[in-house]
Amino acid sequence: MLLGIGMLASPAEAGPPPDATAGRMTGHSPAILSAPAGPDGLPPGREPRGERHAGAIAGSTLLAMTGLLAVWLGVARSRQHRAEKKLLLSEDRFSRIFRATPAAMSIIRQSDGRIMDVNAGWEAITGRSRAEAIGRTPVETGMIAGGDAEGRFRQFLESGKPLQDHEHALHTRDGSTRWLSLSTELLTLRDEPCFVVVAKDVTEPREAEEARQQLARTSRLALLGEMTASIAHEVNQPLGAILSNADAAEMLLELPVPPLDEVRRILADIRRDDLRASAVIKRVRAFIGRQEMVRVPLDLNAVLRETLRLARHDAHRRGVTLSDEFTAGLPEVHADAVQVEQVVLNLLLNAMDAMRDTPVSTRRVVVRSSRKCRDTVAISVEDRGHGIPPGKLARVFDSFFTTRDDGMGLGLALARSIAEAHGGSLSAENNSASGATFHFILPLNPHAAHDRLLC
Amino acid sequence: MTASFAEIPVVHLIDDDDPLRTALTRLLRAAGHEVRAYSSVAEFLLARQGPLRGCLLLDVRLPGGPGGLELQKSLIRQGETVPVIFLTGHGDIPMSVQAIKSGAFDFLTKPVGRTALLTSVRAALARGEDIRSAALKRHDLGTRAGRLTPAERQVFRRVVDGQPNKQIAAELGCCERTVKAHRAQVMLKMEASSLAELVHLSEALAGAPV
């Protein structure tokens, strides 16, 4: 019943086993194979979506399994030429573990990519039977498709590089797509290099994450809608300068002796203003265009400065003074710039809304950045508004909680979910004098444990 | 520099956006205008000395401190008659309406084209000069009227009201010849060559500082 292992164990009889066995099967191959598709998919180092636990479990299962396998191999190798009996016993042990584990596992031969064996967990996750998988490659089973599936799979095989929590799409029989998180290890089984593949179904966490990103994007669109005037102003100023500069240059060139140096300066200014306008448009596009979270090292103060710039015009319209108190020389944070901007913009607009009844002379919002402790940085947004009723302090982050007539009450709930997706936090407190302060805390290292944020 | 505030008409430009201010200044200068540019109302107020001559071109929204509308109101309160052109951006319609209602000369939407800008500025400067010469004329008339004696002034008022000499003499309790003498002095001092011109001058004088 050690079908796969058996084949490896007795190459002489097995002949070209893949084709022979394949004859009996119609199926598709396991997750293992879809895993390899690395090159076109997300880079292996990429963040796993969904809960980190998923990856952790898959990873640790793999570790345990490969450990056992290595033990088994060591045992098998050293004894193989000495005692066939003992070998069979070891094979039996590995086989039992392979069969018994609830984790979805498969074994794929590196030389030709054929599936050597799969377990029950694999059958459950892929919806394909062991019989139809064995002897075929994952591409042949139809589980990985689209693009250059074959090429990508071959590349994976040849590279021999193990995968760690690599997400890949699996095509099910009914044409739908499920997402698997794959981890692989290359081992030598009977002198043949094989990949042991552990797959975990992460479709649900992934879909939840996609829904969250979609919602975040929708909310960004709503935020931009509130700021149309600001954005139009940001684009119109440079456009106005370009137009007047061009008009001026034209008039200067009509003079009997055109001042060419001045015309050259004007052209340089036109170029600069054009770039300034397109930078605004690029920023708006980035703000609404992308859905996936992309974390890169960020200069937090620079992101905050840009956000304030976007809100400044709006603030002026509302008679609000925006000021910043940034701590210089903050270390870079590993975060998604657009999403950080979204959270801060949200907090800024809320702060300004909260000051509708505040006398104009005291309408002020202060944005601060600081080093919270060794591993975190903090952004705070302080207003002089009506504050949060004490009983409602805990509820402001609930979905659909709003104090505005025209609000949907999703802004803060989303802002907090964005903060948490970054391994950070978002909290609120009332100031002793007036208004409220929101604290957005981000870890320098996205994988830092949550409890470290409490310092 | 400051002395020229009143010597020739100047376009006083107030905009907080450096590149735009530079560009507008270049364009206005290329069109032959004298331009003073300021980044804020405060900067303008600090530089201002004596009466303004020319026109004001300013953004309806200016961050920090007083904005364009506040400046306009303050100038009106001070009796400053210099024409004000507002530059407005997207979504400033309510403000533009307010500006026009409180007597703005014109408002231009950014980005503003050369023809619209220069036409408006030229018209504003011409209006400014008209207002100024009218004011000067009133001032001059006031000076002339100031030279009249109280008796001549009484005669002046009655003459332009259309009263005949005889009636004036009766009202003032003097003889007709005295009225004629006063009347000749009024014509002389007011530099009027006819009764019609005298009536016209008296109308121009209404409200002028005497």
Image (tube, grey):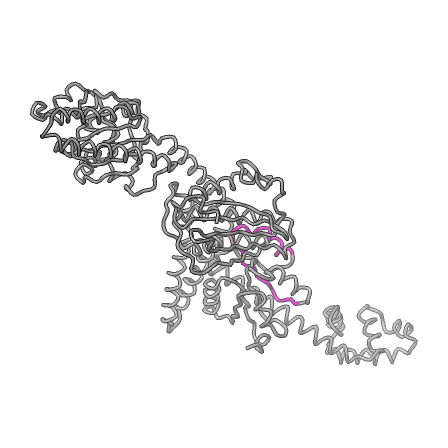
Identify the residue at horizontal 47%, vertical 62% (top origin): B20
- Is residue A133 a member of the stretch shown in magenta? no
Q: Position of residue A415 (x, y in %)?
A: 48, 43
Residue B9 falls in image quadrant: bottom right
Identify the residue at horizontal 81%, vertical 68% (top origin): B161
Identify the residue at horizontal 45%, vertical 69% (top origin): B30
Task: Relative to A73, say whether A448 is above or below.
Answer: below
Left or right of B39: which side holds A51?
Answer: left
Q: Position of residue B146 (x, y in %)?
A: 77, 78
Task: Relative to A242, say whether A340 is above or below.
Answer: above
Question: The magenta stretch spans which residues?
Answer: B80-101
- Which residue is situated farthest in the left direction here? A12
In the image shown, does A99 or B76 lie closer to the viewer? A99
Which quarter of the rendered picture does the N terminus of chain A lie within? top left
Residue A450 falls in image quadrant: top left
Is residue A18 something that shows in the picture?
no
Is residue A239 something that shows in the picture?
yes
Q: Position of residue A47 (x, y in %)?
A: 34, 41
Left or right of A414: which side holds A387?
Answer: right
- Is residue B83 a member of the stretch shown in magenta? yes
Q: Position of residue B35 (x, y in %)?
A: 51, 70
Q: How many marks?
A: 0
Task: Relative to A180, say whether B177 is above or below.
Answer: below
Identify the residue at horizontal 39%, vertical 53% (top origin): A298
In the image shown, does A9 or A43 lie closer to the viewer? A9
- Which residue is situated farthest in the top direction here? A24
